Image (cartoon, helix red, strand yellow):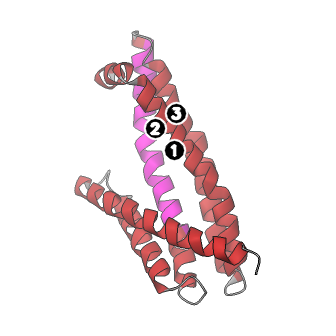
Amino acid sequence: ADTYLRALAAHRGPAFALFAGSALADMLLVPAALALYFALRHLARTAMLLAAALLLFYTFVDLTVYEINSMAVVLLSRQDTAAAAGGAQLVLAVVPIAGCFTLALSSAGTLIFSIVMLRGVFGKPTAYAGIAAAVGGLMGAFYLAFPPLEWLLLLSSIAYGLWGVLAGARLFRLGAPQ
C-alpha cells in the first residue's frame, strides 16, 4: 500500500481525473439503461426490467464502493503516515473484489439487453458487439482468480465502446422526431 500511495502522490491530479471521469460515465449509464429498457420492453418486458435493474444496481455499487474508495485512496496519498497506509491497505483489499462484482453485474445486464436486441430494431452488429463485450466482461471478472483473464477486459472494453456508439446512435434515431 505504501508504494501505491507514493505513486499516487506523484500523480494525484490524473488519478483523481480518471476516477471522476469513471464516476461521470457511471452516471451517464442511468439514462442509457432506462432508454434501452423503454426501447426494448415490448419484446421482453421481464428480461428488460432485469437488465435495467442490473445496470442500475451496478451504477449504485460502483459509485458507492469502487469510485468513492478509489478517490479516498487518492486523498490518503496526500498524507505520509502509517494511518494513511493502513487505511489505503483496507481499501486496496476491497476495491478489486468490488470491481469484479460490478463488472459481472454490468456484463450480465448488457448480455440480456444484447440478446433481446437480436430481435429488435438495433440490428445484429449492435447486438453482437454487446454480446462480445458482455461475455468478455463476465469471463474477465474472474481475473483475481486467474490473472491472464485481465486481457479479456481490454477486448471487452473495446467491444463496449463499439456497442455504446451503435446502441446510442440507434437510440438517438429512435427518439428523433419523424
Q: Nearer the viewer, mark 1 or mark 3?
A: 1
Q: Give yes or no for residue 60 being in the magenta stretch.
A: no
Q: Nearer the viewer, residue 2 or 115?
A: 115
Given the image, on which type of amino acid does mark 3 rest?
Answer: Asn
Q: Nearer the viewer, mark 2 or mark 3?
A: 2
Q: Residue at x 66, y 57 (%)?
A: 30
Secondary element type, mark 2: helix
Which label number is shown at residue 163? none
Find residue 74 and report its horizontal and vertical position in percent.
46, 25
- The part of the chain drawn in magenta is 83-109
Secondary element type, mark 1: helix
Residue position marked by numbered label 2 in the rendering = 18
Label 3 crowding class (10 Å Cα cut-off): few <14, some 14-19, many 20+?
many
Q: Residue at x 30, y 54 (%)?
A: 145
Find residue 118 and report its horizontal and vertical position in percent.
53, 87
Q: Residue at x 48, y 54 (%)?
A: 101
Which label number is shown at residue 69? 3
Q: Are marks 2 and 3 in contact (CB under 8 Å)?
A: no
Name of the residue lying farthest toward the bottom: 119
Residue position marked by numbered label 1 in the rendering = 22
Q: Are marks 2 and 1 in contact (CB under 8 Å)?
A: yes
Give how far apart the Cα atoms at labels 2 and 3 are: 13 Å
